[in-house]
Image (spheres, rainbow, N blue to C red):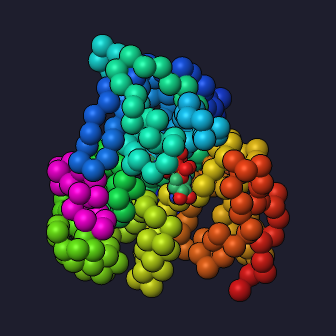
Amino acid sequence: MSSIVSRGSSTTVQGRGEGPLRARCEVLAYRKLGGYHSLTFVAPEMAERAQPGQFVAVAVEAREATLRRPFSIYSVSQHGPWAGTVEIIFDVVGPGTRWLATRSKHHVVDLVGPLGKPFPLPAQPVSCLLVGGGYGAAPLLYLAQALAQQSLRVDMLLGAATQERIFNAIEAKRLSASAQFTTEDGSLGVEGVVTDVMPRMIEAAGTGVIYACGPMAMLAAVSAAAKELDVPCQVAVEEEMACGTGVCWTCVLPYRRKDGVVNLRACTDGPVFNGARVAWSAVGTSAMANAEDGRGRGRRGGRAEPAP
Ligand SMILES: Cc1cc2nc3c(=O)[nH]c(=O)nc-3n(C[C@H](O)[C@H](O)[C@H](O)COP(=O)(O)OP(=O)(O)OC[C@H]3O[C@@H](n4cnc5c(N)ncnc54)[C@H](O)[C@@H]3O)c2cc1C
Ligand code: FES
């Protein structure tokens, strides 16, 4: 894996001494994008620092939601009359996202970002397959632009329950050499799940690296299939998070190292990880409790279990 992708871009950011920022950002635009919602914020410095795979933590002013909510960065613009903008895509699932969906132009929202480590870009000229589930496609479309700037071939495979839950199929087609879709009800593309189509796409495109983002079960299945096909796979996970900045250990992910399985923090060690090294069968077994209830689940850098 290390020979194909490099963490060079994140090192550069650290080298420049640029960490995440906190800023009160004006909403430039709210829009519906298919089955999802989009908010674009005026955030010039965040836009300048952001890289694909990173996220922002949004303070939501909902009574039931005291913690910031994390959202992947979907797109950034560093030019134009607004100097720099950051856009997120979200699904309404609870109080925080319900509140966000009521934001509109000129509202001000408190953001921290960019957080986390970005997708490592290929160190060699390989063909890249981007596999997204639901809104997990959003950071991959941002990544596709970065890969295209390096003149790398990009193929996109997006899956969801229904056509409405596939995020931005048009943009996926525009940014890729080939795009395929799977839906559980067959309303768009192949009826089934992404791993039904993945092997054929890998063979056709000569894929050298896979990048995936979506629900944890999908990431586990994609990582297993990639391992079987001997293709390196980077996954952006969505572990539930409390602080988002490495302090609370709410977001631990069991990760295989030579000497066993350790707990890593999805917010600062990730959210992007080598899918082959995530101990998928142990995910969620570290006695996680909802941090909003004042309980944590993590064991600080502790060993989660012996190496299987
Ligand atoms: C790094 C990262 C990037 C994310 N990017 C996006 C994104 O681009 N778009 C988007 O819509 N959502 C994204 N999420 C998930 C998003 O943060 C949650 O949906 C949001 O916090 C829910 O807040 P709420 O108050 O509306 O609902 P809550 O009341 O907090 O939760 C509602 C339901 O969603 C579940 N849930 C909450 N957080 C997560 C999570 N992280 N993963 C899976 N299920 C969760 C809860 O268990 C509960 O069942 C991301 C999460 C992480 C960690
Ligand atoms: S969310 Fe607090 S350490 Fe990751």
As displayed, is residue 22 above or below residue 99?
A: above
Asked which quadrant contains residue 65, the reply is top right
As displayed, is residue 232 above or below residue 43?
A: below
As displayed, is residue 179 above or below residue 51?
A: below
Q: Position of residue 18 (x, y in %)?
A: 61, 29
Q: Is residue 283 in view from this perspective?
A: yes
**Residue drawn 35% across the image and 59% down it:** 134
Asked which quadrant contains residue 152, the reply is bottom left
**Residue drawn 31% across the image and 47% down it:** 36
Q: Position of residue 203 (x, y in %)?
A: 27, 79
Observer-nearest of 242 and 176: 242
**Residue drawn 27% across the image and 74% down it:** 184
Observer-nearest of 5 and 180: 180
Observer-nearest of 128 and 235: 235
Q: Position of residue 300 (x, y in %)?
A: 82, 57
As drawn, is 54 to the left or to the right of 260? left
Observer-nearest of 192 and 301: 192
Question: Outermost residue, front direction?
Answer: 63
Magenta-colored stretch includes residue 167: yes
**Residue drawn 34% across the image and 38% down it:** 38
As drawn, is 181 to the left or to the right of 90? left
The region drawn magenta spans 154-175
Magenta-colored stretch includes residue 143: no
As drawn, is 110 to the left or to the right of 163? right
The quadrant of the picture occupied by the C terminus is bottom right
